[in-house]
Amino acid sequence: MKVKCLIIGSGPAGYTAAIYASRANLAPVLIEGPQLGGQLTTTTEVENFPGYPDGVEPFTMMDDMRRQAERFGTQFVSGIVTKVEFNQSPMTNHQSHKVWVEDTDLYEADAVIIATGASAKYLGIESERTYRGRGVSACATCDGFFYRKKIVAVVGGGDTACEEANYLAGLCSKVYMIVRKPFLRASDIMQQRVLNNPKIEVLFEHNTLQLTGEGKVQGADLIYRKGAPDEAIRHIDIDGFFLAIGHHPNTDLFKDYVARDAEGYIITRDNSTQCYQSPMTNDQSPILPGIFAAGDCADPHYRQAIVAAGSGAKAAIEADKYIKSL
Ligand code: NDP
C-alpha cells in the first residue's frame, strides 16, 4: 500500500502526529504497535495533561486522542512493524520508504514518523507484574501525587532514581532507596541531595525479592548482601514501589538507518524532529529525508506525555512540509 505519511506508534506522540497529519490532508496510516496507547496506559490516572482539570484515566485520554485522529481520516492498523528499509535519497530517485507490518504487509511512504516510545526497565520479578498500576510505577512525576504522606520505595542508584527520590520526598512521609551496589551511581550533586534529605533512607546493597500486599502494594521483602556471610532478609512496609533503573527506547528496528545515541535514543536535528542517517559522525552528518522522530524514542530527558504530544505535532508539520516539497 502506498501512503504519503506513515506513523509508527500509538502513544501521545503518534496520535498527535496523526491529528496534525490528517488535518493537513496527508491521509496518514498509523501502525498501533504492541501497546495500544503507549506507556501512559501503564499509569493509573493522568493529572498533569492540560485540558483535564479533574484528571483522566489514561485509556480514556488515549482513546480521545485516537478518536480525534480518526475524525480527520487517520487510518489505523493494528500490528507490529517488523522491518523497515529507509531510502537515503528519496528525493532524487523517487523511491519511498518501506515499512513491513507483521513481515507480510508492505507500506511504502513518502514520510515516516517514528513514535515508538521507550519502555521502562523492570526488575523482572513476578509480583511487579501482579501489582502494576496498583502500587508499582515507573514514573514518579506521573504517579507520585497518589502517594502523598505515604511511604514509598525507589529502586535504582542513578540520576533518575535520585531525582525521583527527591521529588517523592517532597510529597511522601518517607522514601526508601533500594540500591544494589554499596554506592550511588548518580552525579555528585544528585547524591548529595539524596543523602542530605532526612526523608530519604538509602538501603545500599539491597535487592528486591518480592512485593507483598492484599490487592495492592503494602510491603517489600528485600535481601541484603546476597551470598555474603552477613546476608539478611528485611521487610519494609511501603505503599508505592517506583522503578528507576533506566529506560530502553524502542528503536532497535531502525538502527541501520537512523542515527542513535549510546543509549539508543534517536538523535534529531536541532529544534526539529528530522533524523540523521546512520552512522552519524558529527552534527554536519546528512539527514535522512522524510524520516522524523517524535516522543520518548528521541527524548532521554523529559519523558512526559505533553512533551511527546508537542513533538508529534512538530513531526507532522515537518512531514507535511517535506511531502509538499517532493
Ligand atoms: P542509569 O543507567 O544511570 O542508572 C540505573 C540504576 O539502576 C543504577 O544504579 C543501576 O545499578 C540500577 N539498576 C539497573 N538494573 C538494576 C536491577 N536489575 N536491579 C537493581 N538496580 C538496577 O539510568 P538512569 O535512568 O538513572 O539515567 C540514564 C541517563 O540519564 C544517565 O546518563 C543519567 O546521568 C541521565 N540522567 C540525568 C539526569 C539529570 O542530569 N538531571 C536525570 C536523569 C537521568 P548499578 O549502578 O549497580 O548498575
Image: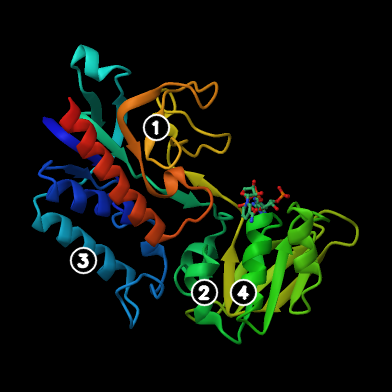
The residue indicated by pointer 1 is 275
Residue 115 placement (x, y as % from top left): 34, 45
Residue 217 placement (x, y as % from top left): 55, 77
Distance between the alpha carbons at the discs numbered 4 and 3: 30 Å
- Marks 1, 3: nearer the viewer: 1
Distance between the alpha carbons at the discs numbered 3 and 2: 26 Å
- Tell me which numbered mark, 2 or 4, is placed earlier along the sequence: 2
The residue indicated by pointer 4 is 168
- Marks 3, 2: nearer the viewer: 3
The residue indicated by pointer 3 is 64
Distance between the alpha carbons at the discs numbered 2 and 1: 37 Å
Tag of residue 92: none
Secondary-structure class at tag 3: helix
Find residue 72 and report its image quarter.
bottom left
Specify few, some or many for label 4: CA neighbours under 10 Å numbering under 14, 14-19, or 20 or more: many
The residue indicated by pointer 2 is 135
- Tell me which numbered mark, 2 or 1, is placed earlier along the sequence: 2
In the visual, does 57 lie left or right of 302? left
User: Please, what is the three-letter code of the amino acid marked with disc 4?
Assistant: Leu
Q: Residue at x 43, y 49 (%)?
A: 296
Residue 204 placement (x, y as % from top left): 80, 62
Number of marks present in the image shown: 4
Find residue 104 and report its image quarter.
top left
Are circles 4 and 3 on residues that touch, CB within 8 Å? no
Q: Quadrant of the N terminus?
A: top left
User: Please, what is the three-letter code of the amino acid marked with disc 2?
Assistant: Gly
Q: Residue at x 60, y 59 (%)?
A: 244
Label 2 near ligand 1 (CB < 8 Å): no
User: Please, what is the three-letter code of the amino acid marked with disc 3?
Assistant: Asp
- Tell me which numbered mark, 3 or 2, is placed earlier along the sequence: 3
